[in-house]
Image: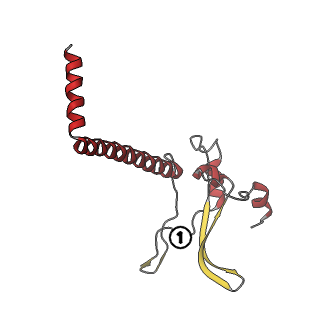
Amino acid sequence: MRLARTLRTALTALTSNKMRSGLTVLGIIIGVAAVIALMSIGQGSQAAITSNIESLGTNLLFVSPGASSTGLVRGAQGSANTLTLADANALADPTLAPSVAAVAPEVDAFAQAVAGSENALTRVIGVTPDYQSVRNWQVAEGEFITDAQVQAGQW
């Protein structure tokens, strides 16, 4: 009996103050929608950041050459040409370095790219086929370089 009376009193209050009831319902709907939207944005951002961090690799070790020096002038880090492809192959050898899962050497330089009447100075990075799996990169169109292309010197 108490429940029925409580419900009747509540319905009477809601119907007597229709504007207040409508605004209250509207406020609750907007509040719930805002919370749902913010949670979705937060989860989407978290997924994007996690994906970016995973693409960097959580177990990567970068080895770069030291700095070159001429007289008393020291060059930038990585400017010395002391590492070779033979060094990378030695790291990839399971008998010499059994804990190394994969090696992906790279060399980079700046070059002038020309297409028709347009040209731009751009960074060019030379890599091996293992680079794609080590860095967890996917090719959007076309195909990544192959071992045969590297051996044949096809760029």
Q: Tell me: 45 left or right of 146.
A: left
Tag 1 secondary structure = loop
Q: Is residue 98 above or below residue 90?
A: above
Q: Give the camera-side residue of 35 and 44.
A: 35
The quadrant the N terminus occupies is top left
Q: x and y percent of residue 138 in the render?
A: 64, 53
Q: Is residue 63 above or below residue 2?
A: below
Q: Tell me: 65 left or right of 3.
A: right
Q: Which residue is mark 1?
A: 80
Q: Give the camera-side residue of 3 and 111.
A: 3
Q: x and y percent of residue 3 in the render?
A: 22, 17
Say how the picture is coloured: secondary structure
Q: Give the camera-side residue of 33 and 48.
A: 33
Q: Residue at x 69, y 86 (%)?
A: 117
Q: x and y percent of residue 52 in the render?
A: 49, 52
Q: Residues within 10 Å of mark 1 (few under 14, many from 20)?
A: some
The quarter holding residue 4 reads top left
Q: Amino acid at mark 1?
A: Ala
The quadrant the C terminus occupies is bottom right
Q: Residue at x 49, y 66 (%)?
A: 66
Question: Residue farthest to the top?
Answer: 1
Q: Is residue 23 above or below residue 85?
A: above
Q: Tell me: 120 left or right of 141.
A: left
Q: Residue at x 23, y 35 (%)?
A: 14
